[in-house]
């Protein structure tokens, strides 16, 4: 197993452990929010419960597909199975998009009859505050693990948990205004959370489509790969560096220029060293090289 793949697997195991923690916590939050929201007549708390459910399903599907994505290349998938994550991400994104739309539509229909909107029970406020505190603690836990693992993927997941806490804060504010007599604010909070779910679905779908259509790596990552290759002894220059994203990783190919007086074996050794350096120091799963004498 290459150093790059070993590092990928190690970070994936750390990610799986922290993600399972997130799944378990969110599972109990979903039940708590939806049940309390139903009996306290809070549309905002129910919407936040579905937002938490969306996050839990997202994490759960990633956990299931990550095992499949780590399977080695075979006769049917010569480049591995990393794009399983992207395919599932697209499905989940479309699902969340329509869930968000349905929630916005439902809350909007209730707002049309604002005189019939009932006041929520104060229990809903206590529940939203509890959820806010739990989600903030989950964010800090995930952030601490991300820093120790030095993983940008885990860091992004941690800040995603912080956005969940923001939705609970919005719901709490909506419930407070409802208790003060402004009953429509609970539904407004539900609409805002619905928009957040819709946006989440759009983001998942957008990123998955780009990955499935061979989107190139970010400019910073491409520059990092270029720098590593150029620092390899024997490399004069490079051209035609191309990248494509597969799951959370990258596959790249490049033309490496070396002195024309070198032997074939010497040029080959330089290309191998450049490839190994890139795969040790970045998210590149494989770097295909072509030697050009200059």
Image (cartoon, rainbow, N blue to C red):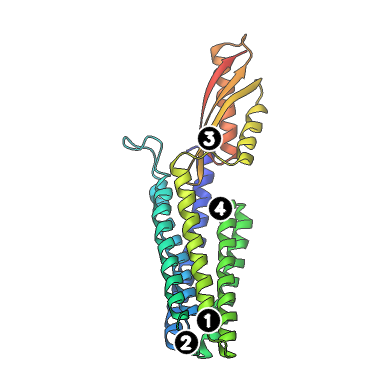
The residue tagged 4 is: 153
Residue shown at 48% from the left, 88% from the top:
115
Q: Which picture quadrant has residue 174?
A: bottom right
Q: Looking at this rendering, what residue extends furthest in the top direction?
A: 261
Real-space Cα separation, disc 3 to disc 4, in angstroms: 19 Å
The answer to whether any part of residue 175 appears in the image is yes
User: Which mark, residue 48?
Assistant: none
Real-space Cα separation, disc 1 to disc 2, in angstroms: 9 Å
Q: Nearer the viewer, residue 111 or 74?
A: 111
Mark 3 or mark 4: whose residue is earlier in sequence: 4
Left or right position of 261 against 76: right
The residue tagged 2 is: 117
Badge 3 crowding class, 10 Å Cα cut-off, few under 14, some 14 to 19, many 20 or more, is many
The residue tagged 1 is: 186
The label nearer to you, 3 versus 4, is 3
Real-space Cα separation, disc 4 to disc 1, in angstroms: 34 Å
Q: Position of residue 179 (x, y in %)?
A: 56, 90
Mark 4 or mark 1: whose residue is earlier in sequence: 4
Label pair 1/2, CB-CB below 8 angstroms: yes
The residue tagged 3 is: 243
């Amino acid at each position: 197993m290459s150093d790059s793949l070993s590092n990928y697997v190690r970070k994936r195991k750390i990610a799986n452990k922290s993600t399972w923690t997130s799944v378990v916590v969110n599972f109990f939050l979903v039940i708590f929010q939806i049940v309390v929201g139903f009996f306290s007549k809070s549309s905002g708390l129910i919407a936040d419960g579905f937002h938490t459910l969306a996050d839990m399903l997202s994490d759960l599907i990633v956990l299931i597909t990550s095992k499949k994505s780590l399977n080695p290349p075979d006769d049917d998938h010569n480049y591995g199975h990393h794009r399983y994550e992207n395919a599932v991400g697209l499905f989940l994104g479309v699902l969340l998009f329509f869930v968000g739309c349905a929630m916005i539509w439902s809350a909007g229909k209730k707002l049309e009859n604002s005189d019939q909107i009932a006041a929520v029970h104060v229990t809903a406020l206590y529940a939203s505050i509890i959820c806010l505190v739990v989600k903030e603690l989950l964010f800090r836990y995930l952030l601490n693990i991300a820093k120790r693992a030095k993983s940008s993927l885990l860091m992004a997941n941690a800040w995603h948990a912080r956005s969940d806490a923001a939705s609970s804060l919005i719901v709490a504010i909506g419930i407070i205004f409802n208790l003060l007599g402004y009953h429509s604010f609970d539904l407004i909070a539900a609409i805002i959370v619905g928009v957040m779910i819709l946006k989440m679905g759009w983001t998942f779908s957008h990123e998955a489509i780009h990955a499935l259509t061979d989107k190139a790596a970010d400019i910073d990552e491409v520059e990092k790969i270029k720098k590593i290759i150029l620092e390899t002894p024997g490399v004069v220059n490079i051209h035609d560096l191309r990248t494509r994203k597969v799951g959370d990783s990258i596959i790249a190919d490049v033309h490496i220029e070396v002195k024309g007086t070198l032997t074939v074996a010497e040029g080959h050794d330089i290309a191998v060293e450049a490839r190994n350096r890139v795969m040790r120091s970045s998210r590149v799963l494989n770097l295909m090289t072509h030697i050009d004498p200059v």
